[in-house]
Image (spheres, coloured by chain):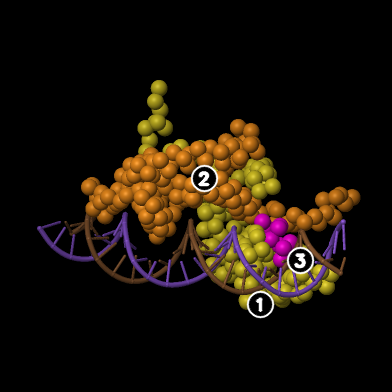
Chain colours: A orange, B yellow, C brown, D purple
Amino acid sequence: MPTAALTEDNEDDIGELADIIGFHIRLAHVAVYRHFTETFADLDLTQKQVSVLWLVDDHPAISQIDVGRRLQMDRATTMTIVNRLQDRDYLRRERSESDGRKQALHLTDEGRAALARAKTAIAEHEAWLKSRFSAEEAEKLVEMLARIHE
Amino acid sequence: MPTAALTEDNEDDIGELADIIGFHIRLAHVAVYRHFTETFADLDLTQKQVSVLWLVDDHPAISQIDVGRRLQMDRATTMTIVNRLQDRDYLRRERSESDGRKQALHLTDEGRAALARAKTAIAEHEAWLKSRFSAEEAEKLVEMLARIHE
DNA sequence: CCTATTTGTTAGTGGAGCATACAATTCGGT
DNA sequence: ACCGAATTGTATGCTCCACTAACAAATAGG
Protein backbone atom coordinates (compact mmCIF):
# COMPACT_ATOMS: atom_id res chain seq x y z
CA MET A 1 0.00 0.00 0.00
CA PRO A 2 1.18 3.52 -0.70
CA THR A 3 2.59 5.22 2.32
CA ALA A 4 2.92 8.89 3.01
CA ALA A 5 6.39 8.76 1.50
CA LEU A 6 4.99 7.89 -1.89
CA THR A 7 2.63 10.80 -2.11
CA GLU A 8 4.51 13.47 -0.23
CA ASP A 9 5.70 16.44 -2.19
CA ASN A 10 6.61 18.88 0.51
CA GLU A 11 8.68 21.85 -0.43
CA ASP A 12 12.00 20.25 0.45
CA ASP A 13 11.48 17.02 -1.47
CA ILE A 14 14.18 16.41 -4.01
CA GLY A 15 12.97 13.06 -5.30
CA GLU A 16 15.49 10.65 -6.79
CA LEU A 17 18.27 13.16 -6.28
CA ALA A 18 18.19 12.09 -2.64
CA ASP A 19 19.77 8.78 -3.68
CA ILE A 20 22.88 10.41 -5.13
CA ILE A 21 25.75 10.45 -2.66
CA GLY A 22 27.54 13.21 -4.54
CA PHE A 23 24.48 15.39 -4.23
CA HIS A 24 24.48 15.10 -0.44
CA ILE A 25 28.19 15.81 -0.27
CA ARG A 26 27.56 19.01 -2.21
CA LEU A 27 24.69 20.10 0.02
CA ALA A 28 26.64 19.28 3.17
CA HIS A 29 29.60 21.18 1.84
CA VAL A 30 27.55 24.28 1.17
CA ALA A 31 25.94 24.08 4.61
CA VAL A 32 29.36 23.83 6.22
CA TYR A 33 30.67 26.61 4.02
CA ARG A 34 27.83 28.87 5.07
CA HIS A 35 28.27 28.25 8.77
CA PHE A 36 32.01 28.69 8.43
CA THR A 37 31.57 32.02 6.69
CA GLU A 38 29.27 33.26 9.44
CA THR A 39 31.61 32.09 12.18
CA PHE A 40 34.58 33.70 10.47
CA ALA A 41 32.91 36.93 9.38
CA ASP A 42 34.85 38.95 11.98
CA LEU A 43 38.18 37.31 11.19
CA ASP A 44 37.57 37.63 7.47
CA LEU A 45 39.22 34.32 6.69
CA THR A 46 38.10 31.50 4.42
CA GLN A 47 38.37 27.77 4.98
CA LYS A 48 41.25 27.52 2.55
CA GLN A 49 43.12 30.42 4.06
CA VAL A 50 42.86 28.92 7.54
CA SER A 51 43.98 25.55 6.22
CA VAL A 52 47.06 27.10 4.65
CA LEU A 53 47.94 29.08 7.77
CA TRP A 54 47.52 25.96 9.85
CA LEU A 55 49.69 23.88 7.56
CA VAL A 56 52.46 26.46 7.33
CA ASP A 57 52.47 26.74 11.11
CA ASP A 58 52.76 22.96 11.44
CA HIS A 59 55.44 22.74 8.76
CA PRO A 60 57.62 25.84 8.68
CA ALA A 61 59.50 26.35 5.41
CA ILE A 62 56.99 24.18 3.57
CA SER A 63 56.90 24.77 -0.18
CA GLN A 64 53.86 25.90 -2.12
CA ILE A 65 53.73 22.70 -4.10
CA ASP A 66 53.67 20.78 -0.82
CA VAL A 67 50.85 22.89 0.54
CA GLY A 68 48.93 22.25 -2.65
CA ARG A 69 49.55 18.52 -2.48
CA ARG A 70 48.35 18.21 1.10
CA LEU A 71 45.29 20.38 0.57
CA GLN A 72 44.68 19.01 -2.92
CA MET A 73 44.93 22.25 -4.81
CA ASP A 74 46.87 22.88 -7.99
CA ARG A 75 49.75 25.36 -8.18
CA ALA A 76 47.70 28.22 -9.55
CA THR A 77 45.05 27.92 -6.85
CA THR A 78 47.70 27.71 -4.15
CA MET A 79 49.30 30.85 -5.56
CA THR A 80 46.19 32.96 -5.23
CA ILE A 81 45.65 31.88 -1.62
CA VAL A 82 49.28 32.42 -0.62
CA ASN A 83 49.20 35.78 -2.41
CA ARG A 84 46.20 36.89 -0.40
CA LEU A 85 47.78 35.80 2.88
CA GLN A 86 51.03 37.51 1.96
CA ASP A 87 49.21 40.72 1.02
CA ARG A 88 47.75 40.70 4.50
CA ASP A 89 51.17 40.05 6.05
CA TYR A 90 50.11 36.74 7.51
CA LEU A 91 52.94 34.85 5.87
CA ARG A 92 56.08 35.50 3.87
CA ARG A 93 57.89 33.70 1.09
CA GLU A 94 61.58 32.92 1.30
CA ARG A 95 63.71 31.23 -1.29
CA SER A 96 64.41 27.70 -0.13
CA GLU A 97 68.07 27.08 0.65
CA SER A 98 67.96 23.43 -0.23
CA ASP A 99 66.11 23.78 -3.51
CA GLY A 100 66.20 27.00 -5.49
CA ARG A 101 62.96 26.21 -7.26
CA LYS A 102 60.96 26.22 -4.06
CA GLN A 103 59.59 28.92 -1.87
CA ALA A 104 59.84 28.35 1.88
CA LEU A 105 56.70 29.64 3.56
CA HIS A 106 56.73 31.07 7.07
CA LEU A 107 54.04 32.64 9.22
CA THR A 108 54.58 36.17 10.44
CA ASP A 109 53.72 37.12 14.02
CA GLU A 110 50.50 38.54 12.68
CA GLY A 111 49.83 35.28 10.92
CA ARG A 112 50.35 33.31 14.09
CA ALA A 113 48.00 35.62 15.96
CA ALA A 114 45.37 35.24 13.22
CA LEU A 115 45.75 31.47 13.33
CA ALA A 116 45.29 31.44 17.09
CA ARG A 117 42.06 33.40 16.71
CA ALA A 118 41.03 31.12 13.87
CA LYS A 119 41.54 28.01 15.96
CA THR A 120 39.11 29.34 18.54
CA ALA A 121 36.55 29.96 15.85
CA ILE A 122 37.24 26.53 14.34
CA ALA A 123 36.46 24.95 17.70
CA GLU A 124 33.08 26.67 17.71
CA HIS A 125 32.44 25.68 14.13
CA GLU A 126 33.39 22.07 14.78
CA ALA A 127 31.17 21.95 17.84
CA TRP A 128 28.24 23.03 15.68
CA LEU A 129 29.07 20.24 13.26
CA LYS A 130 29.83 17.55 15.81
CA SER A 131 26.68 18.16 17.80
CA ARG A 132 24.92 16.04 15.18
CA PHE A 133 26.99 12.95 15.81
CA SER A 134 28.15 10.59 18.48
CA ALA A 135 31.89 10.17 18.82
CA GLU A 136 31.80 6.88 16.94
CA GLU A 137 29.67 8.38 14.19
CA ALA A 138 32.01 11.32 13.78
CA GLU A 139 34.94 8.98 13.48
CA LYS A 140 33.14 6.82 10.97
CA LEU A 141 32.12 9.87 8.94
CA VAL A 142 35.66 11.17 8.75
CA GLU A 143 36.93 7.75 7.80
CA MET A 144 34.38 7.42 5.01
CA LEU A 145 35.06 10.91 3.69
CA ALA A 146 38.77 10.12 3.71
CA ARG A 147 38.07 7.14 1.48
CA ILE A 148 36.68 9.57 -1.08
CA HIS A 149 39.52 12.06 -1.08
CA GLU A 150 42.10 9.31 -0.55
CA MET B 1 55.75 4.74 23.65
CA PRO B 2 56.01 6.72 20.44
CA THR B 3 54.75 4.89 17.43
CA ALA B 4 55.45 5.48 13.78
CA ALA B 5 52.43 7.77 13.69
CA LEU B 6 54.12 10.24 15.98
CA THR B 7 57.16 10.70 13.82
CA GLU B 8 55.74 10.34 10.36
CA ASP B 9 55.74 13.37 8.17
CA ASN B 10 55.07 11.96 4.76
CA GLU B 11 54.08 14.34 2.04
CA ASP B 12 50.34 13.90 2.53
CA ASP B 13 50.32 14.43 6.28
CA ILE B 14 48.04 17.25 7.32
CA GLY B 15 48.51 16.96 11.08
CA GLU B 16 45.74 18.18 13.36
CA LEU B 17 43.69 19.30 10.40
CA ALA B 18 42.83 15.64 9.96
CA ASP B 19 40.63 15.88 13.07
CA ILE B 20 38.39 18.57 11.59
CA ILE B 21 35.25 17.13 10.06
CA GLY B 22 34.64 20.22 7.97
CA PHE B 23 38.05 19.85 6.44
CA HIS B 24 37.29 16.33 5.23
CA ILE B 25 33.96 17.42 3.83
CA ARG B 26 35.77 20.07 1.83
CA LEU B 27 38.37 17.65 0.49
CA ALA B 28 35.73 15.06 -0.36
CA HIS B 29 33.67 17.71 -2.08
CA VAL B 30 36.57 18.82 -4.25
CA ALA B 31 37.41 15.21 -5.14
CA VAL B 32 33.80 14.60 -6.15
CA TYR B 33 33.71 17.88 -8.03
CA ARG B 34 36.81 16.94 -9.97
CA HIS B 35 35.54 13.51 -10.94
CA PHE B 36 32.19 14.97 -11.87
CA THR B 37 33.82 17.54 -14.12
CA GLU B 38 35.82 14.86 -15.91
CA THR B 39 32.80 12.63 -16.34
CA PHE B 40 30.71 15.51 -17.67
CA ALA B 41 33.36 17.11 -19.87
CA ASP B 42 31.61 15.95 -23.04
CA LEU B 43 28.18 17.00 -21.86
CA ASP B 44 29.50 20.31 -20.59
CA LEU B 45 27.18 20.36 -17.61
CA THR B 46 27.91 21.19 -13.99
CA GLN B 47 26.55 19.49 -10.89
CA LYS B 48 24.23 22.38 -10.24
CA GLN B 49 22.94 22.46 -13.79
CA VAL B 50 22.16 18.75 -13.72
CA SER B 51 20.44 19.10 -10.36
CA VAL B 52 18.22 21.86 -11.71
CA LEU B 53 17.35 19.94 -14.88
CA TRP B 54 16.54 16.88 -12.78
CA LEU B 55 14.36 18.85 -10.40
CA VAL B 56 12.45 20.66 -13.13
CA ASP B 57 11.83 17.35 -14.85
CA ASP B 58 10.50 15.87 -11.61
CA HIS B 59 8.39 18.93 -10.86
CA PRO B 60 7.17 20.62 -14.03
CA ALA B 61 6.13 24.24 -13.57
CA ILE B 62 8.25 24.51 -10.44
CA SER B 63 9.17 28.07 -9.51
CA GLN B 64 12.69 29.38 -9.21
CA ILE B 65 12.33 30.07 -5.53
CA ASP B 66 11.27 26.45 -5.06
CA VAL B 67 14.27 25.16 -6.99
CA GLY B 68 16.49 27.30 -4.84
CA ARG B 69 14.88 26.08 -1.63
CA ARG B 70 15.27 22.43 -2.54
CA LEU B 71 18.85 22.79 -3.74
CA GLN B 72 19.71 25.30 -1.01
CA MET B 73 20.66 28.16 -3.26
CA ASP B 74 19.59 31.76 -2.94
CA ARG B 75 17.57 33.54 -5.62
CA ALA B 76 20.53 35.19 -7.29
CA THR B 77 22.44 31.93 -7.63
CA THR B 78 19.37 30.17 -8.97
CA MET B 79 18.95 32.93 -11.53
CA THR B 80 22.40 32.50 -13.02
CA ILE B 81 21.97 28.74 -13.35
CA VAL B 82 18.51 28.98 -14.87
CA ASN B 83 19.79 31.68 -17.20
CA ARG B 84 22.57 29.45 -18.47
CA LEU B 85 20.18 26.55 -19.03
CA GLN B 86 17.73 28.82 -20.79
CA ASP B 87 20.47 30.24 -23.01
CA ARG B 88 21.23 26.70 -24.09
CA ASP B 89 17.52 26.00 -24.71
CA TYR B 90 17.39 23.30 -22.07
CA LEU B 91 14.49 24.91 -20.26
CA ARG B 92 12.09 27.77 -20.63
CA ARG B 93 10.39 30.17 -18.26
CA GLU B 94 6.66 30.70 -18.31
CA ARG B 95 4.68 33.07 -16.18
CA SER B 96 2.83 31.02 -13.57
CA GLU B 97 -0.93 31.12 -14.01
CA SER B 98 -1.69 30.66 -10.35
CA ASP B 99 0.78 33.23 -9.06
CA GLY B 100 1.93 36.10 -11.24
CA ARG B 101 5.10 36.59 -9.22
CA LYS B 102 6.41 33.15 -10.08
CA GLN B 103 8.05 31.70 -13.12
CA ALA B 104 6.97 28.19 -14.08
CA LEU B 105 9.97 26.26 -15.32
CA HIS B 106 9.69 23.57 -17.99
CA LEU B 107 12.27 21.43 -19.75
CA THR B 108 12.47 21.65 -23.51
CA ASP B 109 12.88 18.51 -25.58
CA GLU B 110 16.56 19.33 -25.78
CA GLY B 111 16.65 19.67 -22.03
CA ARG B 112 15.05 16.27 -21.58
CA ALA B 113 17.56 14.74 -23.96
CA ALA B 114 20.42 16.37 -22.10
CA LEU B 115 19.05 15.13 -18.79
CA ALA B 116 18.80 11.60 -20.14
CA ARG B 117 22.44 11.72 -21.17
CA ALA B 118 23.32 13.27 -17.83
CA LYS B 119 21.63 10.47 -15.92
CA THR B 120 23.82 7.93 -17.68
CA ALA B 121 26.90 9.90 -16.74
CA ILE B 122 25.62 10.28 -13.19
CA ALA B 123 25.31 6.52 -12.90
CA GLU B 124 28.96 6.18 -13.87
CA HIS B 125 29.95 8.91 -11.45
CA GLU B 126 27.98 7.35 -8.63
CA ALA B 127 29.48 3.94 -9.30
CA TRP B 128 32.92 5.49 -8.91
CA LEU B 129 31.85 6.94 -5.57
CA LYS B 130 29.93 3.94 -4.29
CA SER B 131 32.72 1.50 -5.07
CA ARG B 132 34.29 2.69 -1.82
CA PHE B 133 31.38 1.64 0.35
CA SER B 134 29.17 -1.25 1.24
CA ALA B 135 25.46 -0.72 0.80
CA GLU B 136 25.00 -0.12 4.53
CA GLU B 137 27.91 2.28 4.63
CA ALA B 138 26.57 4.26 1.71
CA GLU B 139 23.21 4.53 3.41
CA LYS B 140 24.80 5.60 6.68
CA LEU B 141 26.95 8.16 4.89
CA VAL B 142 23.98 9.73 3.14
CA GLU B 143 22.04 9.79 6.38
CA MET B 144 24.86 11.50 8.22
CA LEU B 145 25.40 14.05 5.46
CA ALA B 146 21.69 14.77 5.49
CA ARG B 147 21.94 15.60 9.18
CA ILE B 148 24.39 18.33 8.24
CA HIS B 149 22.37 19.95 5.48
CA GLU B 150 19.07 19.24 7.25
C1' DC C 1 -7.50 49.37 0.51
C1' DC C 2 -3.02 49.78 1.93
C1' DT C 3 1.00 47.81 3.64
C1' DA C 4 4.11 43.93 4.09
C1' DT C 5 5.82 39.96 1.91
C1' DT C 6 7.21 37.17 -1.86
C1' DT C 7 9.38 36.46 -6.23
C1' DG C 8 12.10 37.67 -9.93
C1' DT C 9 15.58 40.49 -11.88
C1' DT C 10 19.92 43.17 -12.47
C1' DA C 11 24.42 44.48 -11.17
C1' DG C 12 28.45 43.95 -8.75
C1' DT C 13 31.94 41.37 -5.48
C1' DG C 14 34.94 37.62 -4.14
C1' DG C 15 36.78 32.90 -3.62
C1' DA C 16 38.30 29.02 -5.73
C1' DG C 17 38.82 25.93 -9.39
C1' DC C 18 40.87 25.33 -14.12
C1' DA C 19 44.30 25.71 -18.38
C1' DT C 20 48.17 27.63 -20.63
C1' DA C 21 52.52 29.54 -21.18
C1' DC C 22 56.97 30.90 -19.58
C1' DA C 23 61.28 31.21 -16.54
C1' DA C 24 64.34 29.35 -13.25
C1' DT C 25 66.16 25.46 -11.02
C1' DT C 26 67.20 20.78 -10.32
C1' DC C 27 67.48 15.94 -11.67
C1' DG C 28 69.04 12.08 -14.33
C1' DG C 29 71.27 9.57 -17.74
C1' DT C 30 74.97 9.10 -20.77
C1' DA D 1 80.38 17.36 -17.37
C1' DC D 2 76.72 18.12 -20.20
C1' DC D 3 71.99 18.26 -22.04
C1' DG D 4 67.28 17.24 -22.10
C1' DA D 5 63.40 16.23 -18.91
C1' DA D 6 60.98 17.22 -14.90
C1' DT D 7 59.75 20.33 -11.07
C1' DT D 8 58.37 24.66 -9.07
C1' DG D 9 56.82 29.19 -9.16
C1' DT D 10 54.60 32.89 -11.61
C1' DA D 11 51.35 35.52 -14.59
C1' DT D 12 47.15 35.77 -17.19
C1' DG D 13 42.66 34.78 -18.09
C1' DC D 14 38.60 31.95 -17.91
C1' DT D 15 34.26 29.73 -15.49
C1' DC D 16 31.33 28.66 -11.71
C1' DC D 17 28.96 29.57 -7.67
C1' DA D 18 28.25 31.91 -3.51
C1' DC D 19 26.94 36.49 -1.67
C1' DT D 20 24.77 41.54 -1.22
C1' DA D 21 21.94 45.38 -2.41
C1' DA D 22 18.47 47.59 -4.79
C1' DC D 23 14.37 47.69 -7.47
C1' DA D 24 9.84 46.13 -9.79
C1' DA D 25 5.78 43.42 -10.02
C1' DA D 26 2.45 40.58 -7.94
C1' DT D 27 0.17 38.65 -4.04
C1' DA D 28 -1.43 38.22 0.76
C1' DG D 29 -3.52 39.79 4.80
C1' DG D 30 -5.25 42.71 8.23
Q: Give the range drawn in magenta.
A: B64-72
Q: What crowding class fits label 3: few (fewer than 14 Cα within 10 Å), some (14-19), or many (20 or more)? A: some
According to the picture, the residue beneath numbered tag 3 turns out to be B62
Q: Where is residue D27 in the image (x, y as percent from the top left)?
A: 83, 67
Q: Do labels 3 and 1 share a chain?
A: yes
Tag 3 near tag 1, CB within 8 Å = no
Nearest the viewer among B29 and B131 is: B29
Q: Compare marks 1 and 2 and give the one earlier in the sequence.
A: 2
Q: Residue at x 61, y 45 (%)?
A: B133
Does any portion of residue B9 appear in the rendered image? Answer: yes
Label at residue B60: none
According to the picture, the residue beneath numbered tag 2 turns out to be B23
Q: Compare marks 2 and 3 and give the one earlier in the sequence.
A: 2
According to the picture, the residue beneath numbered tag 1 turns out to be B89
| Location of residue D25 (image quadrant) | bottom right
> Is B66 one of the magenta-colored residues?
yes
Q: Position of residue A70 (x, y in %)?
A: 42, 47
The Cα–Cα distance between marks 3 and 1, rounded to whole angstroms, is: 17 Å
Tag 1 secondary structure:
loop
Q: Are marks 1 and 2 on the same chain?
A: yes
Amino acid type at circle 1 is Asp
Q: Residue at x 41, y 45 (%)?
A: A53
